[in-house]
Image (cartoon, rainbow, N blue to C red):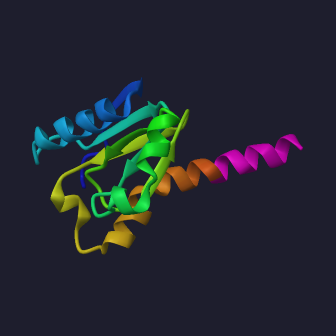
Amino acid sequence: LAKKCWRVIDTKTGTAPWNMAVDEALLSRYNEGGLPILRLYGWHNALSIGRFCDPGKDIDVQSAAQKKVALVRRLSGGGILAHGNDLSYSLIFPRSFAGERSVKENYRFLCRFLIRSEEHTSELQSRQS
């Protein structure tokens, strides 16, 4: 990807359905020629369920409701993720950006900013010790 600019959107903390609706809206309206998007957002207590999970089989839905834990389906695959006061991110970019990399290679490539950030934080903590 020749462009170095990204569109960064910080939507703060939202409900589980709202968070997933924003992701879906951004993805459905994304223009292949547009800037890649990094969206940052937070959650209230919720479980987000990967596209291929079976919530009736994998979650005690009644217990989640009693504990006021929202359940929401994610567009992406993967398992069940527990949320509550955490920071999440979405990445939306042109299909051409993926190139010939595998899904795992793309994940590693796209998340390197998190890895670098973690390494930088660890380095700063070591200096302060």
Percent across and percent down for residue 36 are: 25, 44
Look at 29% across and 39% down and name the residue there: 20
**Magenta part mainly helix, strand or loop?**
helix
Percent across and percent down for residue 103 are: 32, 70
Total marks in image = 0
Look at 35% across and 66% down and name the residue there: 106
Q: Which residues are magenta?
A: 119-129
Q: Is residue 58 above or below residue 64?
A: below
Q: Is residue 126 left or right of residue 100?
A: right
* Location of residue 31 by image quarter: top left
Q: Is residue 81 left or right of residue 117?
A: left
* Location of residue 55 by image quarter: bottom left
Percent across and percent down for residue 99 are: 22, 68
Q: Is residue 77 above or below residue 27?
A: below
* Residue 109 forms part of the magenta stretch: no
Percent across and percent down for residue 108 are: 44, 65
Q: Nearer the viewer, residue 13 or 92?
A: 13
Q: Is residue 93 above or below residue 20?
A: below
Q: Is residue 6 left or right of residue 59?
A: left
* Location of residue 124 by image quarter: top right
Image quarter (top left, top right, bottom left or bottom right) of the N terminus: bottom left
Look at 49% across and 35% down and name the residue there: 66
Image quarter (top left, top right, bottom left or bottom right) of the C terminus: top right
Asked if residue 58 can be seen in this view, the reply is: yes
* Residue 127 forms part of the magenta stretch: yes
Asked if residue 79 can be seen in this view, the reply is: no
